[in-house]
Every structure is written in C-alpha cells, then in structure tokens.
C-alpha cells in the first residue's frame, strides 16, 4: 500500500524476525515516523528451567532492539502477558479440554496484536500500526469498505490467520511486506545489513514456540487414558487423553505398523493410522487406516462464532474456503444460518475437517472472514 505524500506516525510490532524488521525499514524509507514495539505475551519465558531451550522471548527482544538500532528508530518493550492469559490462553485450554483443536494464532491476532497492541499504539499517538504479516489491505471505492487481501507471495500468505479483523482494525493497519515475495524481503534485509537477515522463520505456536506440543499441553491438562479403537470397533491400543490428539493426526499414536486383529490380508495391513474421531462421552479415540478413508472426508461443515471482514456475511458468489492453513482454496457454497453461524458445502470432500479450527472464506484474493468449525 502506497502512502506517498502522507507522513504518518506508525507503530510497528517488532518481533525480532526479518519480516517485521523489513516492515519498519520500508516505512522509514517512505518518510513515516516509525516507533517499534516488542510485544511479550508469555511470562513463563522467564522461568529458568529446562524449557529455556525453547523460550526465545529474550533473544527475540535483543534481535528486535538491534534492528531498531540499525534502522534508527525507538523501541519499547510492552508486556501483554495478562491480556494474553485472559483473552487467548484461557480459551485455548477450554477448547482443548473439550476435545477440540483451536488455532491460538488467530485469536492472538484478533485479541492481542490488533486489539491490545492497537489500543496501546493509539495511546502513543499513532496514526497507524504495522506488522510483518504477508497480507494486504485495500479500500474498495464502490463499497467504501476496507478489504483484506492475500499476500502476493502464495507460499507465505497469512490472510487465513487475520480473517477475524474488522473494519476499524484494517483501517488502522499497514502490511508492507504483503506486497513482496519472501525472497525479496530477505534480499532487502541483507542489502541494508539487518542483523537478523538470515534468521530462521518461527514455526511454533505464538506462546508455545518451538517446544514439543504434547509436553507443553501436559503441564496444563490432565491425562485421561482410554481405548484406541479402529473402524471395526476393535481396541488396538490406548491413548493418553483425547485432548492430546487432533483429527488427521498420524504421528505419536503408538500403534504405527500394528496389524489389527481380523484385518484382511494384503498390502493394506500395515497402512498408516490416522485419528478420525474423538468420542468424549466414552473417552474413545477412533482411528482408521488410509489417508482417503471415508471417516476422514467431509462434503460439508458447520461453523459458529462467525466474523466477517465487511461487517456482514457475503452474498451468494463464487466462494472458496480453507479449513486449515496449508490448504488450497476449495470451491464451496455458503449457507448463512444465523448472524453467528453458517454452513459450507463442498464440491469435493475435504480431508480431516477439525472442530475448533477455522473455516475461512475467500473470493479470489479477498479474504471475507470465517468461523470456528463446530461439526
């Protein structure tokens, strides 16, 4: 998005990564007054225990401060841990305890990065905030509405994680690197000598980081072992607790290579197992063999807690949806049930549609919003 001729006070969320660093530099080059904010959201980063090898908050702040020094901007360290615990982590635990698989990064964006952070920036006199997300914002001249668009780099597009942003949030947000390919961002960082130009991208969940997920979850949710059953109703193992599994999961089941009693002879005997259902009432984990097993395929889904970028649900147009981040857009038909819920019907069955994850709708490059999959 070009802001030529207009000088803003822009507060940039500096994470310590290369994307937010280049974001700050680009805005400074455009003539804006740029202030960096490092957001801390997880107090346990300060604990001196074995988890320190996974906690990168202090390292990230040092990187962010070094970037600010090179670019020539101020940086402030702000602690949002209390807001994060109340607005994101508590909901995360509730969902996992109920057997669903939430996406905390989506809630973190809506509640922390574009709410608590935005409010803080406005108190600093900011005209805009900016982050290193690969997405774009466009004002539609016909509707006078702000649109959320996919980032130009299809491999890095993050609009899926931003689909709960509203008109006010988008009106006050800039995504400079959304106009670039990741390779170009790296090139810029190297050219201007940013100290984190070669830093590896973070792949962890916002507060968990890179640590083993089950190990982390085990600290907060009690294990309730129960049977693992196949689609013939045979018990073939024991799970450690339904909260620790997600639909479509293949690794960590403890039954790899196991031949089920009574299974037909042939090449499929030792096919991989996948989590297909979680039955909370009987504490049973149901698994099936084969990636294309019917239990793993869905032609439709229901979603609740709907959030639409434009403020209302889209009309009947050629829509597509993602039911998980790393997925191609799938053509679908939208049925709006209530102001808070909708259903999607897909032309082709979708794999491992997971309650708690988000179904996000698109019209071409425009992200329209979405909701939490309920069934």
Image (cartoon, rainbow, N blue to C red):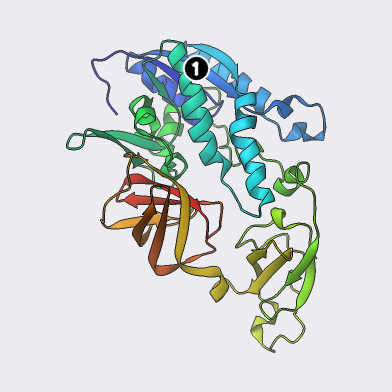
Q: Is residue 26 above or below residue 326?
A: above
Q: At which x and y percent is residue 6? A: 26, 15
Mark 1 — residue? 120
Q: Residue at x 57, y 17 (%)?
A: 66
Task: Decide which of 165, 288 is in the foreground and name it.
Answer: 165
Q: Is residue 45 above or below residue 90?
A: above
Left or right: 243 as drawn, with respect to 204: right
User: Judging from the image, what secondary structure is the residue with disc 1 in?
Assistant: helix
Q: At which x and y percent is residue 74? A: 50, 10
Q: Residue at x 77, y 46 (%)?
A: 218
Q: Residue at x 49, y 17 (%)?
A: 120
Q: Quadrant of the N terminus?
A: top left
Any part of residue 69 in sight: no
Left or right: 245 as drawn, with respect to 25: right
Q: Is residue 346 above or below residue 76?
A: below
Disc 1 residue crowd, few under 14, some 14–19, many 20+, Cα 10 Å: some
Task: Decide which of 180, 229 is in the foreground and name it.
Answer: 229
Any part of residue 119 in sight: yes
Residue extending farthest left = 142
Left or right: 346 as drawn, with respect to 355: left
Q: Quadrant of residue 217?
A: top right
Q: At which x and y percent is residue 152? A: 35, 41
């Amino acid at each position: 998005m070009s802001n030529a001729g207009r000088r803003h006070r822009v507060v940039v969320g500096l994470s310590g990564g290369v994307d937010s660093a280049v974001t700050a530099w680009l805005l400074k080059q455009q003539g804006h007054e740029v202030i960096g904010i490092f957001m801390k959201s997880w107090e346990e980063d300060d604990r001196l225990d074995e988890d320190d090898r996974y906690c990168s908050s202090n390292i990230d702040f040092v990187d962010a401060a070094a970037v600010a020094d090179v670019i020539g901007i101020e940086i402030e360290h702000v602690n949002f841990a209390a807001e994060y615990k109340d607005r994101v982590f508590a909901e995360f635990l509730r969902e996992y305890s109920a057997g669903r698989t939430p996406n905390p990064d989506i809630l973190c964006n809506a509640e922390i990065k574009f709410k608590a952070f935005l409010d803080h920036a406005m108190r600093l006199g900011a005209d805009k905030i900016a982050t290193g997300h690969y997405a774009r914002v466009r004002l539609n001249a016909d509707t006078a509405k702000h649109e959320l668009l996919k980032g130009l780099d299809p491999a890095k597009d993050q609009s899926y994680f931003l689909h709960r942003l509203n008109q006010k949030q988008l009106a006050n947000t800039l995504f400079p690197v959304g106009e670039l390919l990741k390779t170009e961002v790296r090139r810029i960082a190297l050219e201007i000598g940013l100290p984190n130009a070669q830093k590896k991208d973070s792949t962890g969940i916002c507060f968990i980081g890179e640590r083993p997920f089950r190990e982390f979850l085990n600290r907060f949710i009690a294990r309730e072992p129960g049977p693992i059953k196949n689609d013939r109703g045979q018990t073939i193992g024991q799970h450690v607790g339904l909260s620790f599994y997600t639909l479509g999961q293949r690794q960590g089941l403890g039954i790899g290579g196991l031949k089920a009693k009574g299974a037909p002879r042939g090449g499929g005997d030792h096919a991989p197992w996948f989590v297909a259902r979680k039955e909370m009432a009987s504490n049973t984990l149901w698994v099936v063999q084969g990636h294309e097993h019917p239990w793993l395929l869905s032609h439709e889904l229901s979603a609740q807690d709907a959030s639409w970028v434009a403020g209302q649900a889209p009309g009947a147009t050629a829509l597509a949806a993602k039911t998980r981040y790393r997925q191609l857009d799938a053509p679908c038909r939208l049925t709006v049930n209530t102001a808070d819920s909708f259903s999607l019907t897909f032309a082709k069955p979708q794999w491992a549609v997971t309650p708690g994850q988000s179904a996000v709708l698109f019209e071409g490059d425009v992200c329209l919003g979405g909701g939490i999959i309920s069934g």
